[in-house]
Amino acid sequence: MRRAGPPAQPILDPAAESGDAPRTRLRQRTLRERTLGNGVRIVAEELPGREGVSWELSLPIGAIHDPEDTPGATALLWEWQDRGAAGLGARQRREAFARLGVRGGGASGRDRSVVAGSGLADVLADGLALSVHEVTDPTLDDAELETARIHALEALDALEDRPADRLDEELTARAFVGPYARSALGTVQGLTSATPAAVRAHRDAVVGPAGATLVIVGGVDPEAALDLAEAVLGDWRGGASEGSSSASLGGLAGNAPRHPGPPRWADPARHTVPSDGEQTQLGWAWPLLPADDPRVAAQALGLAVLSGGMGARLFREVREARGLVYAVDAGARAVRGAAWGTAHAATTPERVEETIEVVQRELAKLADGVHEDELQRARTLLRTREAMQAESSSGRAGQLMRDLLLLGRPRSAGERLDALLRPTRADVDAALAAAPCRTPTLVVLGPEAA
């Protein structure tokens, strides 16, 4: 998804308070929240002095909800509904976005799918309506499904030209079992065989206001933004009640789609996947502390010691000291109730085994703790990133959405920054030791595997 927002600017005071309860002083912001009668949760925050505004509507629907016989139904639906909504065809929608100066987009994922947009604050009402109509009032013309199918198949086929993205798909498919092992892009068979009736039935069963979350951030009065959002979304209905069929809905608002629960891990193992190309892509995955664990900020600092710029351990030990890779990095993924670490390296076929040995040694060694200078570098890095994101309307919208989905509540920008001030070196060491990377899932993608 493409996001747009004003240039990021620093928001930190020159000096933050210190002590047992550190606080970062930020410019005053107003945040308001409202839950509509149909279940949509809305959070709006003002960024003083801004002319722009960003919004993001997230729905609890993704590949994990796809029917067993139609993998990719959600991906195809997201392409299809973009072909027309609220009486406007695809071209008319593009022209309407252009007239408003709004940048819109959307994407389906594994457990969540979104539509979003950014524009000037004075077009919020029209821009928001134009964005969300593709979810709330799509045309779903049978004649447009084939165009949507072509786009969905092209997105799947494009993985062959994006080795790192293909590696991510292969790693997820082998790290987990059950619904979370599915690709958000679907499969060729699923996308090809899906009929208009099947995709409509899927939409009727799972798409509705229950469980939907909307975030609006920028140069708008929060109460006014909530009122605008309620005017656009307040009458939205849809979604299957638990245990009922889509045919019996009668247009009533239903429950959010049944969630399969947190991801279930497969037994860790090494997997080889043949692929053309000169490089070999290596990927690792292992469990982490979930986002609602009180130690997660300390864990994040520890992971930044592992991978966070040129001073991080992976870059220093794997690329600089040994020259084994073209690129190397690590990070974290999270859904409600679960999180996992990932690492990636791109190397040559003849250096695969040495690269695996060195990277896995660094991953395992992290559980032994960090040095104070490493911790302070990581703390500065993460707090700078947080501050810059918080000053952008799209970046701040993303922060709020992640907190709402993973923690169930919004955090102020200052609270997010303060969370990174509190952990001591002992806290970081304890968090890393609680979720060590001893036996990760490993995927080798490339000519070495052929």
Image: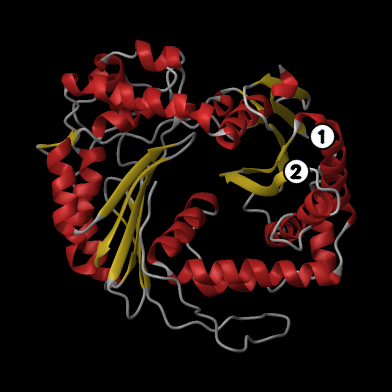
Disc 1 and disc 2 in contact, CB within 8 angstroms: yes
Identity of the amino acid at label 2? Val
Q: What residue is pinned by disc 2?
A: 325
Q: What residue is pinned by disc 1?
A: 351
Which image quarter holds the C terminus? top right
User: CA gap, disc 1 to disc 2?
Assistant: 8 Å
Q: 119 above or below 449?
A: below
Expressed as whole percent of the image width and height from the top left, the position of residue 416 reads 57, 68
Picture mark count: 2
Left or right, 417 with respect to 152, comes to: right
Expressed as whole percent of the image width and height from the top left, the position of residue 233 reads 22, 49
Q: Return the residue found at the far front.
A: 278
Helix or strand or loop: what does disc 1 sit on? helix
- Callout 1 crowding tier (Cα within 10 Å): few <14, some 14–19, many ≥20: some
Which residue occupies the foreground of this view, 273 or 239?
A: 273
Q: Earlier in the sequence, mark 1 or mark 2?
A: 2
Identity of the amino acid at label 1? Arg
Residue found at x 71% / y 73%: 422
Residue found at x 29% / y 68%: 52
Residue 80 lies in quadrant: top left
The image's mark for residue 15 is none
Helix or strand or loop: what does disc 2 sit on? strand
Expressed as whole percent of the image width and height from the top left, the position of residue 204 reads 28, 26
Expressed as whole percent of the image width and height from the top left, the position of residue 116 reads 33, 50
Q: 252 above or below 315?
A: above
